[in-house]
Amino acid sequence: MRFGRHFQESEDTIQLAPLIDIVFLTLVFFMTTTVYTSLESEVDIALPTANSAVPSDRTRGEIIINLRDDGQIVLNNRELSIPELQEVLNRVSANFPGGAVIIRGDREAHLGRAMAVLNCCRNADIQNVSFAALKEEVQGAP
């Protein structure tokens, strides 16, 4: 009886299954992040301009509240009343302490509605509140 060991040299191959999984996961990741970034900009709002406006970086737990010219409050494509907004802000404050709120108000929106949104933020103990504005173009620039 002959007990010999036979070793076969195998060629190194690229495993396609893990590669395809990684490609699909990356695709899903980019698709979901694109949807979230487009939600707040889909609301038809004419933002006011300011010469000191600067683009802001997104942070974890940050929410964007849109205030239309008719006074309607929109959050993630959902129209909210003041009590509903207060509930949402209370949950955000509890889950993300120190979270930020950005108010995108139409330039024709009433100040009273913006003050109601600010009051909701204050009641929820959210201190990091800012207003969105577009960079004002310099007159006479090409």
Image: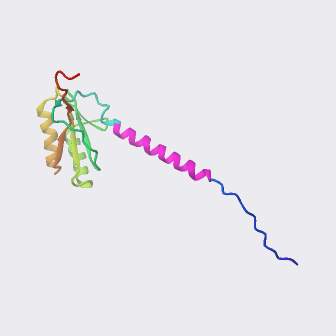
Q: How many marks overall?
A: 0
Q: How is the image coloured?
A: rainbow
Magenta: main secondary structure: helix
Percent x, y of residue 26: 48, 46
Quadrant of res 64: top left
Percent x, y of residue 22: 52, 50
Q: State which quarter of the image contains the N terminus.
A: bottom right
Q: Residue at x 33, y 36 (%)?
A: 39
Residue 137 in the magenta stretch? The answer is no
Quadrant of res 67: top left
Specify the segment rendered in magenta.
15-37
Q: Residue furthest right?
A: 1
Q: Residue furthest bottom?
A: 1
49 to the left or right of 77: left
Nearer to me, 133 or 81: 133
Nearer to me, 81 or 116: 116
Percent x, y of residue 63: 26, 44
The image shows residue 120, relative to residue 113, as above or below, that is below
Q: State which quarter of the image contains the C terminus.
A: top left
104 to the left or right of 36: left
Residue 16 in the magenta stretch? The answer is yes
Percent x, y of residue 46: 23, 27
Q: Residue at x 16, y 32 (%)?
A: 50
The image shows residue 95, relative to residue 47, as above or below, that is below
Quadrant of res 103: top left
